[in-house]
Amino acid sequence: MIQGLDLSHHQSPDKLNWGALKSAGYQFLICRASYGKGTADRQFVRFVELARLHGFKVGAYLFYRQTHSVEDQLAVFDAQLKKIGGLQPGDLFPALDMEENSANGDGKPNAAVFNSACFKIAESWRHRYGGAILYYSSFFPSSWLGADKGAWRNQPGFFHWLADYSKPAGEPRHPDTPSWHIHQPQPRTIPEYANGKEIVDYDVTNSNVQLVTLSIPETEPTTKDETDTSTRPGGADVEHAVEKIGIGAELIAEGLNRMREGLELLKEP
């Protein structure tokens, strides 16, 4: 099994020991890009930039809200991707987070709305990138997706990231899904995050799944829109460059602080 983490603004990039995380065998980080139409995750860009800098495979996910339109939610998600220069070949396919979210004003999941909207989002990614990752709990399809349990989920090109907190890592229940690809067991503390003092969402892949299976291929399935400015000078590239400069400055400052600490230790009798 390959280890990874699910990260959002609930965690801090500064609390990750990036070198130790790499040494411990973690290989992928899936970061929340957006929550519905109104929230761009404030830590997304920094997590992705630092993850790429340290050699991790990167994924981005959209938390779906049934009270918001597909178009509005994709607009926020795509704007977030532009800040990181877009998803690149070798990054994980984009992920769609499907959950019961009534506690936050969405009401109980409506099967017709969920199936239609979530298929539309996932299909748009399958067409653009070659695939999509679907996040949901083991019994979400039978509980909320209607009589056919959201049968569209099991089409080719859709990969399954199952939350099952009751089972050990790598043993999720999947009664309505022929195969699973990533399992999120009970959140836990790990020494590489906050020195083991705070909980983080931990993930593992199926032992038969290589990360390349879940990654955007070297040759993208669709031709890039010539009007897309995300890879041209100016526009989104300027914002992307500014983000990189800011992160680089933070890393330099952190290095200088450690040097100062080391020098102070040398001065001690």
Image: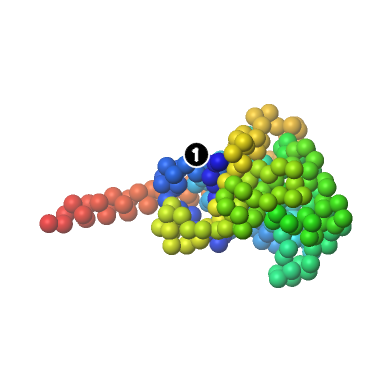
Quadrant occupied by the N terminus: top right
Q: Please indicate whether residue 251 sits to the left or right of residue 160 in the image.
A: left
Residue drawn at the location 42% of the way across and 54% of the way down:
191
Residue 216 percent across, percent down from the top left? 66, 36
The residue type indicated by label 1 comes to: Gly
The percent coordinates of residue 215 (x first, y second) are: 64, 37
Q: Which residue is mark 1?
A: 55
Q: Nearer the viewer, residue 231 or 216?
A: 216
Q: Residue furthest top?
A: 219
Nearer-the-camera pick, 103 or 168: 168
Can residue 223 be seen? yes
Instruction: Identify the residue at image location x=55%, y=58%.
Output: 187
Residue at the (21%, 54%) spot, across then down: 265
Give the image quarter of residue 70: bottom right
In the picture provided, is 96 more to the left or to the right than 69?
left
Residue 165: image quadrant is bottom right
State the SS at label 1: loop
**Within-10-Å neighbours for mark 1: few <14, some 14–19, many 20+:** few
82 versus 111 height, above or below: above
